Image: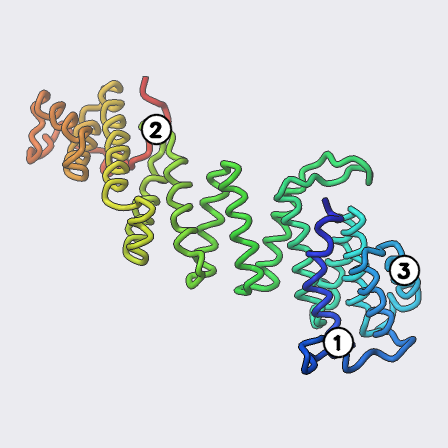
């Protein structure tokens, strides 16, 4: 798989690196003509020759030439060392040794941050991250692909956003990570990643889609009335934001009043469950406060109607003030929508 991908992976780097040593133009007939070439025997000529061999698929020959050159210049201040490291990493990547390739790319990133190869090295690291997110497993003992490469891909993407913040590469990397979590039903990871993406790239063309998936990820995290309703609260707010910023997208995706009504029904059912739990625990004061809040906050829901029936059956008028004997303890004054630590039976 790596060999099939190599020509496409190397295309962008080859074009970038070639610009350092060769100049081309279009002639009157539309043909590409080389105007200048590196001096034979120079370091630029060596790099150009290596790139040609890689493009032609002669990976072993390119690797031998690079190894010979690096044996002389790797520990020197030669200006072509960063390019040689990236090209050697490309050879390793083509040979299926993507983890070893990362070591060369990372050396460029760490030790040659001012080089023109800094950004291409990060792009090569991202290519490896995509392979791991796509299912490629990391080699064990250099032979067997057994370990998941996802943790390495996650680290690469985090570092890209630290090293090239606000860049197109960082934007794409963060979005790819969120999409990976979303595809694999890691809902918390997807929600957190899309949330960071929206904060870091508020003007991205992918913002509507990221907002939509953030909403779906939060809704899917809600496990039912007995559990914390915080994901629903987040989703409700995010729907309002999406409708305000991208009304057409929200309408097309079905993220409008109907979904908001369903979320309110789910949240109301959760609050009703809390109120009933207080009743089973013999705490009518907290139950009354919770049910009153349910009726006021979600007046049009089925759960609110059930809560109102309980209030009326027990003689708890909505406007009735608590009796002195029913004084509410500070910790019960404003119960949250989260279910109690001990679930209702």
Q: Secondary structure at mark 3?
A: helix
Q: Which mark is residue 67?
A: 3
Residue 275 percent across, percent down from the top left: 23, 27
Q: CA distance from mark 2 to mark 3?
A: 60 Å
Q: Are marks 1 and 3 in contact (CB under 8 Å)?
A: no
Classify 10 Å Cα crowding around label 3: few (below 14), some (14-19), many (20 and above).
Answer: some
Q: Nearer the viewer, mark 2 or mark 3?
A: 3
Quadrant location of the C terminus? top left
Foreground tag (1 vs 3): 1
The residue drawn where x is 28% and y is 30% is: 270
> In the rendered image, which residue does mark 1 sit on?
20
Q: Residues within 10 Å of mark 2 (few under 14, many from 20)?
A: few
Sooner in the amino-acid sequence: mark 1 or mark 3: 1
Nearer to the camera, 159 or 81: 81
Dividing the picture into quarters, in which one does residue 46 lie? bottom right
Which of disc 3 and disc 2 is earlier in sequence?
3
Instruction: Report the side of 36 relative to 276 (left or right).
Output: right
Q: Position of residue 297 (x, y in %)?
A: 18, 39
Instruction: Name the side, left or right, on which 274 lies relative to 194.
Output: left
Whether residue 274 is situated above or below residue 65 in the rendered picture? above
Q: CA distance from mark 2 to mark 1?
A: 60 Å
The number of numbered discs placed on residues in the rendered structure image is 3
The part of the image, by quadrant, that contains residue 337 is top left
Dot 1 lies on which element?
loop
Residue at horizontal 75 percent and vertical 36 percent from the top: 145
Examine the rendered structure and indicate whether residue 184 appears above or below residue 171. Answer: above
The answer to whether marks 2 and 1 mark residues whose Cβ atoms lie closer than 8 Å is no
Horizontal side of 244 relative to 24 (left or right) equals left
> In this figure, which colouring scheme has been used for the structure?
rainbow
The picture places residue 86, in percent across and down from the top left corner, at: 76, 62
Residue identifier under label 2:
224
Q: Position of residue 151 (x, y in %)?
A: 64, 43
């Amino acid at each position: 798989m790596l060999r099939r991908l190599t020509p496409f992976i190397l295309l962008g780097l080859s074009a970038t690196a070639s610009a350092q040593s060769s100049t081309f133009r279009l002639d009157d007939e539309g043909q590409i003509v080389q105007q200048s070439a590196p001096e034979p025997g120079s370091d630029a000529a060596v790099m150009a020759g290596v790139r040609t061999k890689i493009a032609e698929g002669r990976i072993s020959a390119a690797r031998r030439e690079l190894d010979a050159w690096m044996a002389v210049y790797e520990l020197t201040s030669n200006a072509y060392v960063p390019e040689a490291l990236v090209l050697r990493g490309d050879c390793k990547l083509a040979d299926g040794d993507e983890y070893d390739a990362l070591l060369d790319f990372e050396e460029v990133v760490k030790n040659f941050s001012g080089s023109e190869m800094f950004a291409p090295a990060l792009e090569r690291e991202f290519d490896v991250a995509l392979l791991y997110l796509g299912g490629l497993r990391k080699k064990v003992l250099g032979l067997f692909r057994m370990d998941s490469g996802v943790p390495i891909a996650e680290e690469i993407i985090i570092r890209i956003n630290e090293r090239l913040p606000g860049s197109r590469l960082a934007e794409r990397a963060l979005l790819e990570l969120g999409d990976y979590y979303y595809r694999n039903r890691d809902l918390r990871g997807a929600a957190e990643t899309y949330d960071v993406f929206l904060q870091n790239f508020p003007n991205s063309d992918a913002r509507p889609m990221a907002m939509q998936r953030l909403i779906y990820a939060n809704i899917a995290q809600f496990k039912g009335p007995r559990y914390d309703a915080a994901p629903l609260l987040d989703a409700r707010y995010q729907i309002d934001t999406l409708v305000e910023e991208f009304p057409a997208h929200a309408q097309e995706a079905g993220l409008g009043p109907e979904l908001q009504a369903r979320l309110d029904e789910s949240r109301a059912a959760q609050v009703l469950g809390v109120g009933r739990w207080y009743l089973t625990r013999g705490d009518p004061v907290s139950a009354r406060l919770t049910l009153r809040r349910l009726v006021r906050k979600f007046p049009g829901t089925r759960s609110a109607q059930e809560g109102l029936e309980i209030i009326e059956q027990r003689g708890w008028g909505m406007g009735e003030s608590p009796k002195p004997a029913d004084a509410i303890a500070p910790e019960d004054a404003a119960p949250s929508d989260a279910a109690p630590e001990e679930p209702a039976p």
